[in-house]
Amino acid sequence: MTTLKISNLHVSIEDKEILKGFNLTVNTGEIHAIMGPNGTGKSTLAAAVMGHPSYEITEGEIWLDDLNILDLDVDERARAGLFLAVQYPSEIPGITNVEFLRAAINAQREEHDKIGIRDFIEKLDEKMALLDMPEEMAERYLNEGFSGGEKKRNEILQLLMIEPKMAILDEIDSGLDIDALQVVSNGINAMRGEDFGSIIITHYQRLLNFVTPDFVHIVMDGHIVKSGDASLAKQLEKEGYKGLIQELELDIEINE
Amino acid sequence: MRKTDSFSPYRNTVKHLSQNLNEPEWFLNYRFEALQSTDKLEPPKIERLNYAAWNLWQVPTIQSQTVSNSPSHSVNEKDVLVLDFKQAFLEQPELFKTIYQKTNFIHFEHLFDAFTMAFLTDGLFVYIPDNIQVKEPLELSFLQNNQLEKTINRQVLIYAGANSSVEIMDKYSSIENDKEAIANIQIQVIAEDGAKVQYSSLDQFGENTQAFIQRTGRTGRDAEIHWALGVMNNGDVIEDIHVNLEGQGSTSDVKTVAITHGDQVQGVNVNVTNIGSYSLGNIFQHGVTLDESTLTFNGIGHILKNSKNSDAQQESRILMLSDNARADANPILLIDEYEVQAGHAASISRVNQEQLYYLMSRGLERKQAEKLIIRGFLGNVLKEISLSEVRQELIDTIERKLAQYDN
């Protein structure tokens, strides 16, 4: 079992503190949903764990088992088993999806253990079929000219190909129609298992109809204000964040 | 930018060089005319690139035996000729003379043209008759042995007759690269009415070679010349391209990829002039600068008066990978006619940090991620190159160049 442990995390961007003492522990085999209104630090959490250079960690720790994540560069974190699927991935013209995927898989492997072209193609075909992606998308340039939905499928394709231990999916559901949402959910569910843990960040409950989380956490004002099981998401859907603020007697203003 | 000494005392050298190629008198006379002009002419001015300190104008030594750079490619096509000048004088004297007199080689505008003509060491003639479609690409490769040939002055004349088509794969490189050498090369492509020429070249002179490589093209009515150039030299090199779109409805595009590294200087100076109406010119160049090197891209699109409904486009972009490198992307559009379309884009940038972060977040090491971004950047031009052999060879060369970048 692998454990991601985030303790008392404080993160600032351009001198503005966004995360204010965030705590969360995720084990492989678990799926955690993080919900919260816009601007409460959900995406900041994702970027800080992955190591985006614009985010400054002012306090706290992140450990992946006995590895101090904050000591590692972005690529080292990825090779340690972390993965982040983002809402707006970069477009990189001139590099095909397929060569990028192969390079990414091989980056995780030792020199003597690189994936063979045959195994790679087989795996790629299987995963693309699962995500209902047309074959030609493999030969297209990485995210270049992809629609919003195609980009998100492509993020999930990378997840399925790289098979990380711990993935953060940052609003992977936003802007997807119901069919696309189902396809993306199939991809996430295919990863589910003892060797995989995930933090699913979402603004809406609807993704959680397809991917049932083991835990749900509500984030407001830079930290978790309430945790529960899957029913918490349903309750939230009914009562909204405003209801939750009243229930918890919080002094927070939100823009939903 | 004037060279110091006069070349007029070298009349005997000129004669000897001429004898080496068994030249007829008419050709020798052009050499003498050129020699006379050398004292009056200046080297061509290349915007934003000062090469006054280069040693390009070194009179070649006369060898008892000329080094053979005879075409190795056998041509199966009927009536297609690939001959060095020596063979051409012998086997096709009338045809060669007629066509040679159509070229720019006999007009001396700058010291470069005059010097190369006067002290010509080597020449190649490619002739595609009217209406012939050459199926297989013609490979012309030139290898300079820096030990044996301190200076080469070479002319290549590619003539595509009316409604013919041909793909030319050219290549320039050198051996014995610890020795200093000079190369002055003039390549002219004449595409007659309706002819279609795809000319590609991979230029890889060694680190101690200084070279001036000039390529000129001329299009007849509805003719096309497509250029794909890999500027991958290791030394100081100017690549100077001039295309005159003379014929109505004619087209030319000049696609260039360049990498500079070490302390070398490379300049790519592309001029496309729209003369005929409905003519279409496109300059598309992407380059990468490493280490302390310098790369200059000039794109000069010129639409002449009466070139109605013509189109001149250009894009020059340079990716800088080192704080100590120098890059210059210089777009110039000169338009003397109203009813035209024209556009240009130029940029000098560094590796996009968001792209880098994204690739690294999938486990790629920084260098590997940077290399992918560089390849992608150059790939924008590569994907436009229609010959897959040329594209692959360029990709391999880029990989080799970037492999040095690991250290």
Image (cartoon, coloured by chain):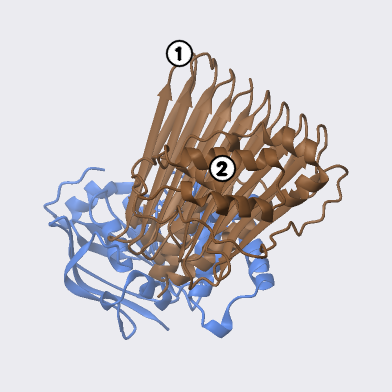
Chain colours: A blue, B brown
Q: Residue at x 59, y 20 (%)?
A: B276
Where the N terminus of chain B falls, by quadrant? top left
Q: Is residue B111 left or right of residue A18?
A: right
Q: Rounded to the nearest whole Å, what is the CA distance between mark 1 and mark 2?
A: 29 Å
Q: Amino acid type of disc 2?
A: Arg
The x, y position of residue A230, in whole percent, is 39, 62
Q: In the image shown, does B149 or B368 lie closer to the viewer?
A: B149
Q: In the image shown, does B41 or B164 lie closer to the viewer?
A: B41
Q: Residue at x 40, y 66 (%)?
A: B360
Q: Is residue A107 left or right of residue B81?
A: left
Pick whichever of labels 1 and 2 is earlier in the sequence: 2
Q: In the image shown, does B14 or A22 lie closer to the viewer?
A: B14
- Chain under callout 1: B
* Residue identifier under label 1: B338
* Residue identifier under label 2: B215
Q: Considering only vertical position in the picture, is A54 above or below B240?
A: below
Q: Considering only vertical position in the picture, is B149 above or below B132?
A: below
Q: Considering only vertical position in the picture, is B337 above or below B378?
A: above
Instruction: Using the rendered view, name the quadrant where residue B40 is placed.
Output: top left
